[in-house]
Amino acid sequence: MTPPIRSLTFTSELDAPADRVWESVGTMEGVNHELAPWLRMTSPPEASGLRIEDAPLGRPLFSSWVLLAGVLPIDRHHFKMAEIERGRGFVEDSVSWSQRRWEHRRHVETRGDAACLLTDRLIFTPRVGAAGPMLEYVIGAIFRHRHRRLRARFGGAGTRVLV
């Protein structure tokens, strides 16, 4: 029996133009800034300068270790991009050791000249069904933290969490 599909959505209003936010969130450096100090994701040297909009679609991009406190491997994530809209968002359709399927949709919506709305929608299927509630809790905590870091960096209002 396949474990149930889980879904979480997080939205933050940021006090920065969408293009400035995209410049940060479209890189592994930006991802790691959001995850710090609790987690870090690795990337191969050839992907160090890669911007998300330059990633190939529909084929494996690279594999990344998810490191607790930057050192302890806790998951292995295999990136694959399904859709990319330059400056606006992406759909990642990946797998990991913990997730049979991991879909991360990130959208940056302009709100005037100096603000934007950033939304992360996660749809995932844990490899082990019994781990679903724990993974939903942990992933929720990670994305609430990521949105706090985004608001600290760019300014802005609280996160809405939709389940």
Image (cartoon, grey):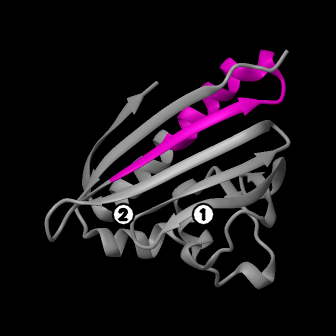
- Residue at point 37%, 68% (across, down): 21
Q: Could you tell me which quadrant the N terminus lies in? A: top right
SS at badge 1? helix
Residue 52 horizontal side relative to residue 128, left or right: left
Q: Is residue 150 magenta?
A: no
SS at badge 2? helix
- Residue at point 17%, 69% (across, down): 114
Quarter location, residue 79: bottom right
Residue sitting at the far left: 112
Q: Which residues are magenta?
A: 118-143
Give the number of marks. Answer: 2
- Three-letter code, disc 1: Asn
Query: Up-down: is 37 above or below 29?
Result: above
Q: Residues within 10 Å of mark 1 (few under 14, many from 20)?
A: some
Q: Nearer the viewer, residue 99 or 142?
A: 99
Q: CA distance from mark 2 to mark 1?
A: 13 Å
- Residue at point 66%, 25% (across, down): 5
Q: Nearer the viewer, residue 110 or 32?
A: 110
Query: Up-down: is 3 above or below 21?
Result: above
Query: Up-down: is 86 above or below 130?
Result: below
Asked whether the residues under the numbered discs 2 and 1 touch, taking CB atoms below 8 Å apart as contact, a structural biologist would say no
Residue 61 horizontal side relative to residue 143, left or right: right
Q: Is residue 126 magenta?
A: yes
The residue pinned by badge 2 equals 153
Residue 65 horizontal side relative to residue 93, left or right: right
Q: Residue 36: x percent and y percent?
A: 58, 57
The residue pinned by badge 1 equals 32
- Residue at point 30%, 68% (across, down): 18
Q: Residue 27: x percent and y percent?
A: 56, 72
Q: Residues within 10 Å of mark 2 (few under 14, many from 20)?
A: some
